[in-house]
Amino acid sequence: MAMSADDFRRLALGFRETVAEPHFDRTAFRVVRTYATLAPDGLTANIRFTPEQQAFKCMLAPDAFSPVAGGWGKQGWTTARLDRLTEPELTDALLIAWQRGRLKKLPKGE
């Protein structure tokens, strides 16, 4: 079943200590750090992976995941098309990003 913006919010806010707050024209989901943002139209979200995690997700599901253009994408930020993800796929992606979002300091080079 395809995911929606409401599904994204429900799943992201289900992770302990996550808060949603405005971030430019988007909604950011964060713990210590922002780990995902939801587009205003609710069709896509940007999820923060490591570059290696991004490459893996984009290889596994190129119709659902793609690097964000420019420098943000090189840092691992990845656009997810919500309508092309199942709940387990989206939950897994958010869990990976949430775990990194809990770090006070990212490992060197990330």
Image: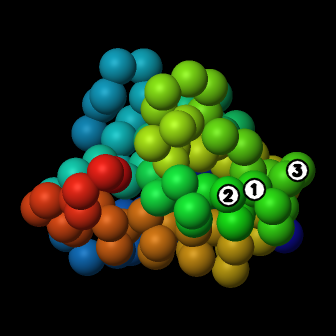
| Residue in view at x 49 percent, y 58 percent | 49
Residue 88 position, x and y percent, is 68, 80
Residue occupied by mark 3 = 63
For this rendering, which residue is in front, 47 or 50? 50
Question: The N terminus appears in which quarter of the rendering?
Answer: bottom right
Q: In this rendering, which labeled residue sits more in front, label 1 or label 3?
A: 1
Q: Residue 33 location in percent, x, y?
A: 22, 52
Give the crowd class for mark 3: few <14, some 14-19, many >=20 residues within 10 Å: few
Would you place residue 10 above or below residue 6 in this image?
A: below
Residue 85 position, x and y percent, is 77, 62
- Disc 1 packing (10 Å; few <14; some 14–19; many ≥20): some
Q: Indicate which disc, 1 or 3, sits on the residue closer to the N terminus.
A: 1
- Three-letter amino acid code at disc 1? Cys
Which residue appears at 45% of the width and 42% of the height?
A: 75
| Any part of residue 108 in sight | yes
Whether tag 2 and tag 1 are in contact, CB under 8 A, the answer is: yes
Residue position marked by numbered label 2 in the rendering:
55
What is the crowding at mark 2: few (fewer than 14 residues within 10 Å), some, or many (at least 20)? some
The amino acid sitting under disc 2 is Ala
Q: Position of residue 99 (x, y in %)?
A: 34, 73
Marks 2 and 1 sit apart, C-alpha to C-alpha, by 5 Å
Three-letter code, disc 3: Asp
Taking the image as drawn, is residue 82 in sight? no
Q: Nearer the viewer, residue 110 or 42?
A: 110
Give the residue at mark 1: 58
Indicate left or right for 16 with 4 as reference. left
